[in-house]
Each structure stands twice: as C-alpha cells, then as structure tokens.
Image: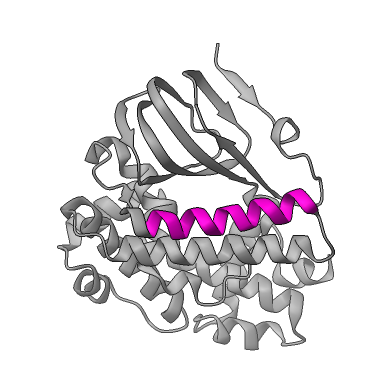
C-alpha cells in the first residue's frame, strides 16, 4: 500500500502554501503520493526516479515537476542531493499576468509530466552548472524567507517562487532536445489560446502555430490536457468570464462579448453547463 503524505506533514506554516525541503543525502524512498505538487531540483548525485508505470535515471541538473497525487519514489541513490519545493496549487493562486503566454511554462509544468513515460524522461529540463546555481540561489532565498518569517515573508517567498518559475520556463524554451521541442510546440498553441481567447479560433491557426498536422495536434493536445483545443478554449473563456463576474460591474451581455462569445444566450447556456449555475447566480453568490 502506497504511503500518502498530507499537506500538514510538510507545510509547517499554514499561512504559506509553499514548503522547501533540502535533502543532502536522499535515501531510497518507497512509492508514495501526496496532496501537493513538487518542483524538484537535483543538485548532485544520481538515483533512479520511479512511478507506477516507469523509471528513469536522474542526475545533477535535472529539474522536473511532480503533480499532486502522482505516485513516485527514489531508489539506487548515490549521494543524491535535492531541493524539493512543495506547493499547494489550490491555495497559491499566483497572479498569472503574462505567465500563460510562455510556452516553456506550459511545457515544463503541465505537458512534460504527462509525456514523461512516452519520452523516457528525455523531455525533462536539464540545467548546466551555471543555470543550476542560479536556480538553487533563488530556492535558497525562498527557503530563508520561509524559515525566518520576517514581516512580508509570504509576499517575498511567493515572489521568489514566481521568479523561479519564470527562470526555469525560459530555460526550458532554450532546450534543444527533440522531445522538448515537441512539447514547446503544444505549449505555443496553448499560449496563443491564452492570449487570443477573445478572437475567433480555428484548428488551422493552431496547427500552423504548433507546426503539426490537425490529427497530430488533436491527439497530442487531448493527451496533454484531457480536452480538445476547442474544449480548452471554451473553459478558458468561461474562466475569464468568472473573473469579470467577480471583479467588475459589466452586464452579462458585455461579459459574453468580452470573452469571445458572439451570443449571450449561448454564453449563458455554456456557463451553466460548466459551472452548474447561471452567470447571474454565480455573481450573486
């Protein structure tokens, strides 16, 4: 039976949805799950990282994301040194700003964990010594903020985590491995949708952006997101509509057109299907 770790097992500060744990000599660890996600920086040594379905060697410079509830473990470790940055996506609520316009962000944090088995981990991010030192320095500053809890530490720790996300996403965009480039093409399509969700969207446009055939795009997009591009677009528009309902006084028709719907009645029907309530009820509640 797999061991399951709770947020309370590692997150010592209930006010901070981040926890940093350094392992200077990571011992073998059995298959386990946890109710949070992990960003893993391998500082040195080697090991085999394994899941329910596969296993891969890891070494200095490897960076990868373990999504919440994904079972994994380590074995055959030799002087393995890690920094684990654990984060609770539900409570973190990072300001997205232009983060979703970065193909490297989608590739590293969403797509690569889904494609790890298919690519035999060749799609992971691997940093050279200089970039690994930069990433480790950001993690150490985050760790210091979380440890000392000086005034403003929650804001500062969150900002440092955001810097680390952007740094690693930019590093991923510079990866030359064919497997990484394939994920970046899907990431580019997702980024385009995030930036152009108000506009009419066609599969032809997405295939040109991703540099794939329509059948390949549909197959790989669904495998990565569990949705077709048009289903992803619909949910993106509804998500943006929810933000406008919460934060503005725009009426329902204005919000429908602002989020890419050409018919307010169609918008209301789709909103109810996805959110189980009408836009008006959502705003009132």
Q: Which quarter of the figure is the C terminus placed in? A: bottom right
Horizontal side of residue 267 vs 170, given as left or right: right
Q: Position of residue 131 (x, y in %)?
A: 37, 59
Q: Position of residue 244 (x, y in %)?
A: 68, 79
Q: Nearer the viewer, residue 70 or 204?
A: 70
Residue appearing at x 19%, y 74% in the figure: 208
Q: Can you tell which quarter of the image residue 68 is in?
A: top right
Residue appearing at x 65%, y 47% in the figure: 88
Q: How many numbered marks appear?
A: 0
Residue appearing at x 23%, y 43% in the figure: 122
Q: How is the image coloured?
A: one colour
Is residue 22 visible from the viewing direction of this image?
yes
Predominant SS of the magenta segment: helix
Q: Position of residue 27 (x, y in %)?
A: 49, 20
Q: Nearer the viewer, residue 13 or 284?
A: 13
Q: Nearer the viewer, residue 121 or 156?
A: 156
Magenta stretch contains residue 132: yes
Placement of 219 over or under 170, stated as above or below? above
Region rendered in magenta: 131-148
Is residue 230 visible from the viewing direction of this image?
no
Q: Nearer the viewer, residue 187 or 160?
A: 160
Magenta stretch contains residue 231: no
Horizontal side of residue 112 vs 206, given as left or right: right
Q: Which quarter of the figure is the N terminus placed in? A: top right
Residue appearing at x 56%, y 76% in the figure: 97
Horizontal side of residue 85 vs 234, given as left or right: right
Q: Position of residue 164 (x, y in %)?
A: 51, 61
């Amino acid at each position: 039976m797999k061991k399951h770790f709770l947020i309370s097992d590692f997150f010592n500060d209930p006010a901070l949805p981040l926890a940093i744990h350094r392992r200077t000599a990571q011992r073998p660890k059995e298959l386990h799950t946890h109710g949070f996600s992990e960003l893993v920086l391998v500082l040195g040594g080697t090991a085999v990282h394994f899941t329910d379905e596969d296993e891969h060697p890891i070494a200095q410079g490897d960076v990868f994301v373990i999504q919440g509830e994904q079972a994994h473990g380590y074995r055959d470790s030799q002087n393995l040194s890690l920094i684990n940055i654990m984060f609770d996506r539900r409570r973190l609520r990072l300001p997205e700003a232009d983060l979703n316009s970065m193909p490297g962000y989608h590739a590293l944090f969403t797509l690569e964990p889904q494609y790890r088995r298919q690519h035999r981990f060749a799609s992971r991010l691997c940093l050279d010594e200089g970039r690994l030192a930069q990433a480790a320095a950001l993690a150490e500053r985050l760790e210091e903020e979380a440890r000392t809890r000086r005034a403003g530490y929650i804001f500062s720790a969150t900002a440092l985590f955001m810097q680390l996300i952007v740094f690693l996403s930019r590093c991923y965009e510079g990866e030359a491995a064919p497997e990484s480039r394939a994920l970046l093409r899907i990431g580019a399509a997702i980024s385009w949708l995030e930036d152009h969700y108000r506009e009419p969207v066609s599969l032809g446009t997405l295939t040109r952006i991703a540099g794939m055939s329509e059948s390949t795009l549909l197959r790989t997009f669904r495998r990565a997101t569990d949705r077709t591009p048009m289903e992803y677009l619909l949910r993106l528009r509804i998500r943006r509509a929810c933000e406008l309902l919460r934060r503005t006084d725009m009426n329902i028709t204005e919000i429908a057109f602002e989020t890419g719907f050409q018919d307010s009645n169609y918008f209301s029907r789709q909103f109810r299907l996805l959110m189980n309530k009408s836009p008006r009820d959502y705003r009132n509640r």
